[in-house]
């Protein structure tokens, strides 16, 4: 992207300290967002300290062990640690030296009511407020409801009335599985502040991205809203295509063809139009709920988003029934193999994964579940202790009356179907990610049940077809 140098964003540095002009960044919270942000900013050349209150996590990182699975992360961490740009600490000493402090702690759903739980954010702010440099820029990367930045500012002002600390919202849009690429090549960088100095410092933080992505300079509240509105829109798009998939099953359509046909319309776009077992992960479901709660707090309803979230929840719980339907209505006493436990491929994150709801549903219906996931089994064991965890896809399929593909890991796209036929009790694949070709499965003599591809709908749907024929007669 060419940029007119005259219009380039202002520069605030150099940040001269101890004979070193590098920008000093501290990141609070070393999870999926904090660790990726920290290492990418170090890779941009800044001096970064990642701080987490989980001292075991920090000790592991200092031994060179990466606590999460994210492609390319281990090599990038190793390189930046070796070059002296990236350090890890369980205490907050580095805060005092930092020009910029990023808050990247979790904001899960508050138990019981669905509001965002901001206790980790406020606890972190209270901890670091006394330590911040007088001119520090305090940046919220965590996803927080509109108005949270105002409350953070109030907390900081109360503790540091004479300091010139600026609170900025800079929401993160990276996706697990492609997090490094997303951070280094974002669709946009959203900077929420009206303060000119803070904008200049943030321009320095993201300087390598100035020619890569548009910078969206907005007020802090708008930045907070952008993040939630984006996630709510994505959740709505997925719920939309999932309902179209159900309709395809009823009327003899194929959702893959329909999605391609509508996605080529530039106003719609092809992404996030894949039918699946429902949206999972640590963001979209809880952020949708939090946005709905924000609206309720202000006496209004977000009916489109409420419906999209309700459709999604219902769908996750319907998947076990879809498997049962493929087995003549019952899984009781049967062994089901499940491939994939994470909410998407290329992560170990099983938070709110559709596979969790699927397996719990199958177990409720009396099935024995054997499962395999390339990266998510340790996390899954905490929520689903009564599963037989296997060391390969073929071991999970061993003796199974159906094999369910719940996550679209690459290695599940090229299974040896001859091997599978040999080990399974019967050749039945329920593909909740539509990753196989129907003809390929037919040739391999598998019964193949996919999503939104009517010829292979789990439930025989004679009634609607008859009605359609009657209508066209
Ligand atoms: P996470 O649970 O993986 O990591 C949070 C980390 O913060 C944990 O390691 C925890 O020990 C640490 N922490 C909590 N309180 C602390 C404190 N007071 N001091 C120091 N460390 C503390 O969370 P995550 O998935 O990285 O998400 C972080 C935020 O980013 C959330 O608001 C989330 O909604 C948002 N987000 C997440 C993603 C994603 O893909 N995971 C993408 C965009 C935005």
Image: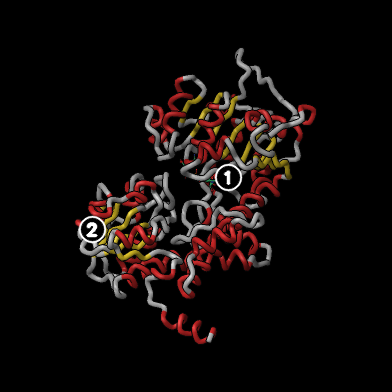
Q: Report if the beta carbon of the residue with label 1 is closer than 8 angstroms to ligand 1.
A: yes
Q: Position of residue 105 (x, y in %)?
A: 52, 42
Image coordinates of residue 290 in percent, x first then y, are: 57, 57
- Name the residue beneath numbered marker 2: 421
Decide: is 355 above or below 332: above
The location of residue 163, given as percent across then percent down, is 70, 31
* Horizontal side, residue 191 vs residue 390: left or right: right
Residue 301's mark? none
The quarter of the image holding the N terminus is top right
Q: Residue at x 46, y 80 (%)?
A: 465
Numbered disc in front, either 1 or 2: 2
SS for dot 1:
loop
Foreground: 183 or 131? Answer: 183
| Number of callouts | 2
Task: Mark 1 or mark 2: name the one nearer the start of the chain.
Answer: 1
Q: Position of residue 413 (x, y in %)?
A: 37, 50
In the rendered view, would you say 410 is above or below 78? below
Query: Residue, x 19% and y 56% (percent of image)?
Result: 422
Give the residue pinned by disc 1: 173
- Tell whether circle 2 marks a residue whose Cβ is less than 8 angstroms from ligand 1: no
**Name of the residue lying farthest toward the top:** 19
Q: CA distance from mark 1 to mark 2?
A: 41 Å
């Amino acid at each position: 992207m060419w940029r007119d140098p005259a219009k380039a964003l202002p520069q605030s540095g150099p940040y001269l300290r101890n004979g070193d002009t590098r920008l000093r960044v501290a990141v609070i919270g070393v999870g999926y967002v904090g660790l990726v942000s920290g290492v990418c900013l170090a890779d941009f050349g800044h001096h970064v300290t990642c701080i987490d209150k989980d001292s075991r996590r920090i000790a592991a990182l200092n031994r060179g062990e990466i606590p999460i699975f994210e492609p390319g992360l281990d090599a990038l961490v190793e390189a930046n640690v070796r070059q002296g740009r990236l350090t890890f600490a369980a205490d907050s000493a580095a805060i005092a030296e930092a020009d910029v402090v990023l808050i990247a702690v979790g904001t899960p759903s508050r138990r019981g009511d669905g509001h965002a739980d901001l206790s980790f954010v406020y606890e972190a702010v209270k901890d670091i407020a006394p330590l911040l440099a007088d001119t520090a820029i305090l940046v919220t990367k965590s996803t927080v409801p509109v108005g949270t930045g105002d409350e953070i500012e109030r907390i900081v002002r109360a503790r540091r009335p004479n300091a010139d600390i600026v609170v900025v919202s800079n929401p993160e849009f990276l996706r697990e599985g492609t997090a490094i690429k997303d951070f280094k090549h974002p669709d946009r960088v959203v900077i929420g502040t009206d303060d000119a100095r803070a904008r200049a410092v943030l321009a320095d933080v993201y300087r390598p991205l100035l020619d890569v992505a548009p910078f969206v300079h907005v007020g802090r509240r708008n930045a907070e809203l952008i993040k939630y509105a984006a996630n709510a829109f994505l959740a709505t798009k997925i719920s939309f295509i999932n309902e179209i998939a159900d309709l395809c099953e009823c009327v003899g359509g194929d959702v893959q063809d329909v999605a391609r046909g509508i996605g080529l319309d530039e106003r719609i776009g092809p992404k996030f139009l894949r039918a699946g077992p429902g949206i999972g992960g640590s963001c979209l479901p809880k952020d949708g709920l939090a946005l709905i709660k924000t609206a309720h707090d202000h006496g209004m309803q977000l009916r489109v988003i409420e419906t999209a979230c309700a459709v999604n929840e219902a769908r996750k719980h319907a998947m076990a029934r879809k498997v049962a339907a493929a087995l003549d209505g019952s899984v009781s006493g049967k062994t089901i193999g499940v491939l994939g436990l994470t909410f998407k491929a290329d992560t170990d994150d099983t938070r709110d994964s559709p596979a969790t709801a699927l397996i719990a549903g199958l177990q409720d219906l009396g099935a024995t579940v054997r499962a395999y996931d390339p990266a998510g089994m340790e996390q899954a064991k905490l929520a689903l202790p009564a599963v037989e965890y296997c060391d390969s896809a073929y071991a999970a399929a061993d003796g199974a009356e159906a094999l369910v593909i719940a996550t679209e890991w690459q290695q599940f796209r090229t299974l040896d179907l001859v091997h599978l036929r040999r080990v399974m009790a019967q050749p039945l694949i329920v593909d909740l990610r539509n990753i196989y070709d129907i003809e390929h499965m037919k040739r391999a003599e598998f019964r193949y049940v996919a999503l939104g591809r009517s010829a292979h709908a789990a439930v025989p749907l004679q009634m609607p077809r008859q009605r359609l024929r009657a209508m066209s007669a």
